[in-house]
Image: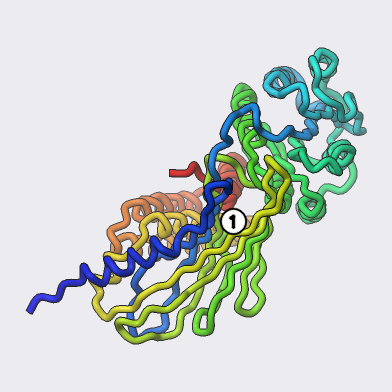
Amino acid sequence: MKTSFLPLLFAAALASVASLFAKNAHETVRLQIDIDRAVLPADSTERAVVKIGFNCLPLPRRESRPPVNLALVIDRSGSMSGDRIAKAREAALELVRRLGPDDVVALIAFDSEVETLVSARRVGNARGLEAAICSIEARGNTALYGGVAQGAEQVRRHIEDEKYINRVILLSDGLANVGPSSPDELGRLGAALLGQGISVTTIGLGLGFNEDLMARLAQRSDGNTYFVQNSADLPRIFAAELGDVLNVVARRVVVSVDFPEGVRPLNFVGREGVIRGQQAELTLNQLYGGQEKFALVEVEISPASAGVEREIARAHLTYEDALNQRTATLSARRAVQFSSNTKIVVSSADHRVQADYAANALAVAKDKAIALVDAGRRDDAAKLLRQQSKELKAMGDLYGNVSVQASAAAAAPEAEKLERDGLSNVDRKSYRSESQQTRNQQSSVR
């Protein structure tokens, strides 16, 4: 007799729909819990990936957006001479012209010293600000830490007014060689600014900057990071970053996920969240309208009999609505079922969760590969990428997930190239930038 597994899948899907979304017509954020498979193998200890998604509605009208409190911090050291400083001025001018009169902006330039060219103020007609941007010329060394710290100090002048979205945008093409200059020092600065509600976006230009430092600063402050090899791309990058800043719908975001007995949280995949016993917690600075931000938690699940349904996670989200400065809370739960039928398990796979996991697992592997190459262990770095490629290929083949298969296929030749040639300066910067962008776990809402 042929066994039909459609009723079980339908029941799992129905339960999923009932518990996926916690939403309110007046909320700007929707909290969703997904899992890589809605049905898990029975009678065995299993690992699974739980995805906590924050789906943010687009702003109702552009003119309704909250104003921004922005500090532009621009490297004017000697290495920025010529086309680089010219394109930096052009990009900064275009950014300022897209701001509204009620936005607040400060302009800081740094070389051997740090200079506040325009103190934090409302944009108004922007003529004086544009003139200050046009006056920036390249000279001296690179006091990067001081530049970011001074930019943050300007942002703090208006931070008590909670209507503002606070951001520092840093552009640099060189190594920090004046003042604190290590990734750890800049990472600690980023973490401190996150605690104050300030994110730092870093834009590394050319091949002379320290990508570890720039990525760490952005990551620890919940900002974005970019690698720009050609200065002609600067206006596009500035426009993309401003697009995020002008679309913030939520801030001061805290999500806690409670896992019941029998579900053990192991680690965040790609993020620096905190796990305490049966609870995982993550703090984010801002969420953007029209985009999904998410977190992935790998868990170990104790055995259950076929036909059993168990709750796997409960999530609680607290955030401040950027439009009205009111605190909102959301909750969601997710259950899974167990089956001894392999076809049911395979058919229940959530390909998007698996693809997100694959991308972030590779990003983490690439970060580890960089450290191994730096330590002179090129062969071990290649071996790590090969192993990750092999594991992802097995997942992609089992569940027929073409996105996971593509990620696995792309990693294999990279391992060969890394073993043969090591990491060039361009490759290293690309690895670090792409890894950070992936680990930011942000995409357009589908």
Q: Is residue 124 visible?
A: yes
Colour mode of the rendering? rainbow
Instruction: Point out the image quarter for the N terminus.
Output: bottom left
In percent of width and height, residue 94 lies at: 68, 19
- What's the residue at 46%, 76% (across, down)? 311
136 and 335: which is toward the camera:
335
In percent of width and height, residue 402 lies at: 31, 52
Left or right placement of residue 177 versus residue 442 in this view: right
Furthest residue toward front: 25
Label 1 crowding class (10 Å Cα cut-off): few <14, some 14-19, many 20+?
Answer: some
Furthest residue toward left: 1
Q: Is residue 167 visible?
A: no
User: Which residue, given by chain and number where applicable, does mark 1 sit on?
Assistant: 367
- What's the residue at 25%, 74% (across, down)? 342
228 and 355: which is toward the camera:
355
In percent of width and height, residue 363 lies at: 53, 54
Left or right placement of residue 353 versus residue 133 in this view: left
Left or right placement of residue 351 versus residue 216 in this view: left
- What's the residue at 70%, 35% (across, down)? 66
In percent of width and height, residue 410 lies at: 40, 49
Relative to 9, residue 179 above or below: above
Please identify the quarter of the rendering in which residue 393 is found.
bottom left
- What's the residue at 79%, 43% (across, down)? 162
| Amino acid type, label 1 | Asp
Please identify the quarter of the rendering in which residue 79 is found.
top right
